[in-house]
Image (tube, rainbow, N blue to C red):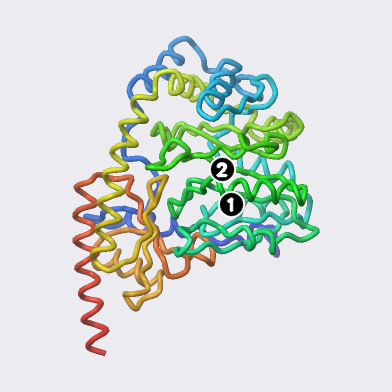
Amino acid sequence: MKNVLSDRVAGLKPSGIRKFFDIAATMKDVISLGIGEPDFDTPKPIIQAGIEALKRGETHYTSNHGLLVLRQAVSDHLKTLYGVEYFAQNEIVMTVGVSEALYLVFTAILNQGDEVIIPTPCFVSYQAEVILAGGEPVEVATHAKNNFVPKIEDIEASITPRTRAIFIGSPSNPTGAVYPRSFLTQLAELAEKHDLIVVSDEIYDRLVYDVEHVCFSSLPGMYDRTILLGGFSKAYAMTGWRIGYVAGPKAYIDGMVRIHQYSIMSAPTVSQYAALAALLVGEPYVQEMRAEYDRRRRLVVDGLNTIGLPTVEPKGAFYAFPDVRSSGLNDDDFCGRLLEEEHVAIVPGNSFGFAGIGYARVSYATSYEKIEIALERIERFLKRQKNRKDFF
């Protein structure tokens, strides 16, 4: 048979994250700094809430939007933290993680050929979801010298008559950049000027260090043109529960629910009850985990810079993004040889867009002790690589 797959699917680039994770899984004694998943277990009270929901027989569909009590808790949570209030009845929909949220957003708002501006390096799913929805991603490079925060003039220069939306992820995966209020205010003015939607992925909003997180929809005039993505995977260590949400004006949410009801029906019921418990009792655990990530962050940044891999200090999430070009290797070869020779798994920067070429993503969502060992192995690898360069 010819053309078994659609052109959109056939043209998708395989995930560089998954590629290295799959290789590492076949090896012994590998320290994985590659996957963006907390090494903490879900806090016990959240697990218990899921168990109790099962015991009560909460094993049926919820409404397409999700449990109303959970949506109200999300609304209250956002209002308390950021002063932005969403109507729980029809301005929030619970999703199967932010991954489904991305699918819903772009499928709902994009017509064939519409463009979405995406600052890169960025999470691997962003461009792919735009393409699958029939749109065209337009990458705008960010740079280490600007702490991986986009320049507003670069974004404006990328706007065309086909531009439908600007997508931002702050805190950023993979760079750890947190966009400051000054930049976001400029972006808000730009969105207003060109009548654009801003899609804001804020899944790492609770994991910031020494800076404020600015919820984009809380900025003046941005409520009506912002689609906000959030979830529970990162801050509450709930990746396997697959629960997230989209919040935004009713007109956008209505469109997303139409897609959601045919593709998913409703987010997992037991996960919704666990998410409710996370919002009600999970804050002490968030603070405890955030403090530990901060401790690891300082170890990683100091360690990478000391051994000769220039690294901008990340202000959020749990990633560092070192420049590996001083090794004399491109990012694919650096990560491949490091895995083969020293059994340390990190992800090539080109996986996150063209602006990531020459860099690598290091996740510090693993234990402090393992990170210490990984840094020793990376240093040993770099010394060997320097000897190779000197020999040739």
In this rendering, would 149 be left or right of 1? left
Check if mark 2's residue and mark 1's residue have beta carbons within 8 Å: yes
Q: Tell me the quadrant of the picture where the N terminus can be found.
A: bottom right
Q: Which residue is mark 1?
A: 126
Q: Which residue is pictured at 20% across the width and 53% down the height?
A: 372
Label 2 SS: strand
On the question of residue 238 being in view, the answer is yes
Mark 2: give few (<14), some (14-19) or many (20+) Cα within 10 Å: many
Counting from the top left corner in percent of width and height, residue 118 is at 61, 56
Task: Work out which residue is located at the far right of the displayed protein and give it.
Answer: 161
326 or 99: which is nearer to us?
A: 326
**Which residue is disc 2 drawn over?**
201
Q: Is residue 375 above or below residue 255?
A: below
> Which residue extends farthest bottom?
392
Amino acid tagged 2 = Asp
In which quadrant of the rendered view does residue 391 lie?
bottom left
